[in-house]
Image: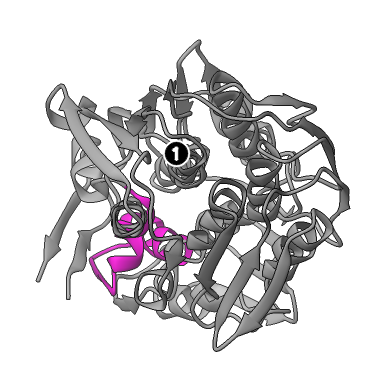
Amino acid sequence: MDKLLIEGGVALAGEVSISGAKNAALPLLCAALLTREPLTLTNVPDLNDIATMLKLLVQMGVKVTQEKVGAGLTAQTSVTLDASGLDNPVAPYELVKTMRASVLVLGPLTARCGEARVSLPGGCAIGARPVDQHIKGLTAMGAETSVEQGYVHTRAPRLKGARLFTDMVTVTGTENLMMAACLADGETVIENAAREPEVVDLAKCLVAMGANISGAGTDVIRIRGVERLHGATHRIMPDRIETGTYLCAAAATGGAVRLTQTSGSYLDAVIDKLMDAGCEIVLERDAIRLKAPQRLKAVSIRTAPYPAFPTDMQAQFMAINTVAEGTAVIRETIFENRFMHAVELIRLGADIKIDGNTAFVTGVGRLEGATVMATDLRASASLVIAGLAARGETLVERIYHLDRGYEHIETKLAALGARVRRVK
């Protein structure tokens, strides 16, 4: 199993390009299921989660063609998906267990094929994460739904427009129901909808395919169903979480970086907090510059649905607060058990105390390198940031989590001067 060996204490400097957004790419790949015509997506990130989703679509009968344009760190992949031969509306446990986003095939399959059989995401008790909201919405649109032997079964000759209200804000739930509603009979209104930029990106692609959608980016989305969708070409938005992660890495190491092929327009809450920490930030049309102060100031955060501070950036800010001046209070309101990285940061010398969903982080003068273990995708990123700021060597184990969400992370960090390499 691969590990990441980091020799810390180097201020990051230079320029690196940001990849396409994983959390936008996954639902966009599923959108190909809604049409018999080819859908071409550009700026597709090279990630394990993307490979898993493509494998899932291929076993359903989707033909996938990939093309790489350019070379090195600026190379981009385009993927063309042809679902005209879709003949197996099943998502088996073997593929779904590694990636919760696999549930995004449920809505498109039900709308296009009139039925779907999708394994529940691995380790997911149905009430623990809002998979029940997907089922509730499809049921309201006229689908017969059942959960048997770990699979969600849906059947509907044609879905019917309905007024849907989700009990909680759910990004994948909003995306699934929005895709399903594109081919439904009549108008569907999704209330309490997720407002994330990735939802807007999906809506833009669906509209390019002939869908009738308004309100994406607000908490009420209206979709008037059409008979069929056609093919299109769509460029995936930049990854705002990857952008935020590299900004935090530069901040924690006292560096100065320029991130290209990205935008600050999706990152207001993150940029505000980095500026509160003392960073100088300049927003360009398609790039962001950051210059860190000699020492960061502690910044408190509270996670909440977009446009508030993203839960996917909580771990990275915990890492930068470990070396900041003062004490920060971090409140996690989205997911339970999302402080598992705190224990590993403490192994590096961090001063962190946990009380329920609140962490108190008091900055120390210097972290010390150690062996740490990643527990999830964003926790992995926090450990890398801490390792870059620490004195000596840090070995991050179980980095397969990183490979799910960060494209060529060691190569990009090396381009910014970091002493980091992948070891077997």
Tell me which residue sits at (60%, 24%) in the image: 204
SS at mark 1 in the image: helix
- 340 and 215: which is toward the camera: 215
Asked if residue 343 is positioned above or below residue 324 in the image, the reply reads: below
Asked if residue 396 is positioned above or below residue 192 in the image, the reply reads: below
Circle 1: residue type = Ala
Tell me which residue sits at (45%, 15%) in the image: 286
- 387 and 4: which is toward the camera: 4
Asked if residue 249 is positioned above or below residue 264 in the image, the reply reads: below
Tell me which residue sits at (39%, 34%) in the image: 20
Extreme residue in the top direction = 285
Colouring scheme applied when the structure was drawn = one colour
Looking at the magenta stretch, what is its main secondary structure?
helix
Tell me which residue sits at (21%, 50%) in the image: 410
Magenta span covers which residues? 378-406
Q: Which residue is mark 1?
A: 32
Where residue 292 appears, x then y in whole percent?
Answer: 47, 35
Mark yes or no: residue 26 visible. Answer: yes
Q: If the image is split into quadrants, where does the C terminus sit?
A: bottom left
Number of dots carrying numbers: 1
Where residue 290 appears, x then y in whole percent?
Answer: 47, 28
Residue 400 is a magenta residue: yes
Where residue 65 appears, x then y in whole percent?
Answer: 21, 36
Relative placement, left or right, of 192 versus 207 is: right
